Amino acid sequence: MSLKSVNKVDTNKSELEITVSAEEFEAAIQKVYLRQRKNIALPGFRKGKAPRKLIEREYGEAVFYEDAVNECAPAAIDSAVAESGLDIVARPEVEVTSVGKEGVTIKAVCVTKPEVKIDGYKGIEVEREVKEVTDEDVDARAQQLTEKNARLITVEDRPAQNGDQVVIDFKGFKDDVAFEGGEAENYELELGSGTFIPGFEEQIVGHSVGDEFDVNVTFPDEYQVEELKGAPAVFKIKLHEIKFKEVPLLDDDLVKDSTEFDTVDDYKADIRKTMEEQAQKVADSAVENKLFDAVIEKMEAEVPQEMYDARINEMLQDLQGRLAPQGITLQQYFHFTNQSLEDVKKMYESQAKKQVDLRLALEKIAEIEGIEPSAEEIEEEYKRVAEAYSMELEQVKNVLPEDGVKLDVKVSKAVDLIKDSAVIK
């Protein structure tokens, strides 16, 4: 395998011409033959025992060529990319231009990391704003304790009203025909929660336990089930039970029973402290985002779309990983959220662009500043990753190449440099 030539064909694109020698291609053909012969039968030979030359005479000299190219091409391309010294950011577009006994010729168009220019990243001026924590904010947070200690009381002497929790049977009909997914028994529903489509919960209000009645609604035009979009429907309802939420007073007794504090004042003081600490963290995060936005604005680069697409795909894989423990597939997620794959990709687009641009800028800053992490810093980063993912240190080291971890540390140190030199007003 050899790299014959490297030609730049566009901004951030280079074409590699790669050759696989006759000897290397012959070895790949022989490997394919040995793997496939068990499935090949020729007259006069037991299955799997037919000689290669007879198979090629029977089916043509090129019978194993396609599989042999697939056998040898990946290693040839990887070797050529490494030899070229190109920093590629996506899998190459590959074309086999010739194949025969004399070997194989391959063209691979590679998308490369862009050239980055950046200046003025030190001494960036940003304003830090800390949200004031008001008495109203503290009171609202404190009242959540009463909601946590609320209890449901069965109602028998009045009709249902907003805020009540009801237990119902329902069955939905479109054009007098029951539709799939429109039926349930002993369903618990909080009236006014907006759980059901508009108009459904409102029509339960005013009915009493034991009532059987119809609810007439129209499904939204954007409803996820195609045949129900914008369609009128009737739900047959039976109301079994009504409960209302009894919310206790926020007093010292409730605080004593439910928290580590003895009085409402002590409880609120702790809430204020926590909220003020959170406000400081939010302000710090906002400052960091402003600094990052400023850094991106100072960067010049023609970033290939492939880098953004790759980041979007990584974000989709991350979403899939977070859904898997819940037993939810991506397709089910799209159905539940009334979104398509393209909708979610579009949603991730701006975030992916910012992440890619920022990473490129930070890597360039690390290069300009000559940032080189120590062996101890690299080891600490491995330990941090191991702890974050609950993995053994050696296991992480086997998975993550040191070059990648080293670059991550460089980027982190570049962030510190930007923050330390920033002018915070």
Image (cartoon, rainbow, N blue to C red):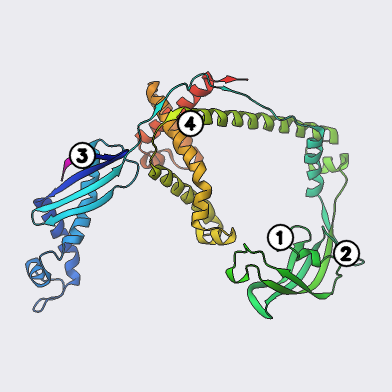
Question: What amino acid is labelled 2 in the image?
Answer: Val
Quadrant placement of the C terminus: top right
x, y percent for residue 422: 54, 20
Q: Taking 128 as reference, is 179 above or below it?
A: below
Query: Closer to the N terminus: mark 4 or mark 2?
Result: 2
Residue 182: percent from left, percent from top: 66, 72
Quadrant housing residue 217: bottom right
| Tag nearer the camera, 1 or 2 | 1
Residue 213 found in image quarter: bottom right
Where does label 4 land, which residue? Answer: 296
- Measure the C-alpha gap from mark 1 to mark 3: 60 Å
Q: Is residue 6 magenta?
A: yes
Q: Which residues are magenta?
A: 1-7
Q: CA distance from mark 3 to mark 2?
A: 80 Å
Measure the alpha-carbon separation of dots 1 and 4.
Answer: 42 Å
Please tell me the numbered disc located at residue 155.
2
Q: CA distance from mark 1 to mark 2?
A: 22 Å
Amino acid type, callout 4: Ile
Residue at 10% in and 76% down: 45
Which three-letter amino acid code belongs to the residue tagged 3?
A: Val
Q: Nearer the viewer, mark 4 or mark 2?
A: 4
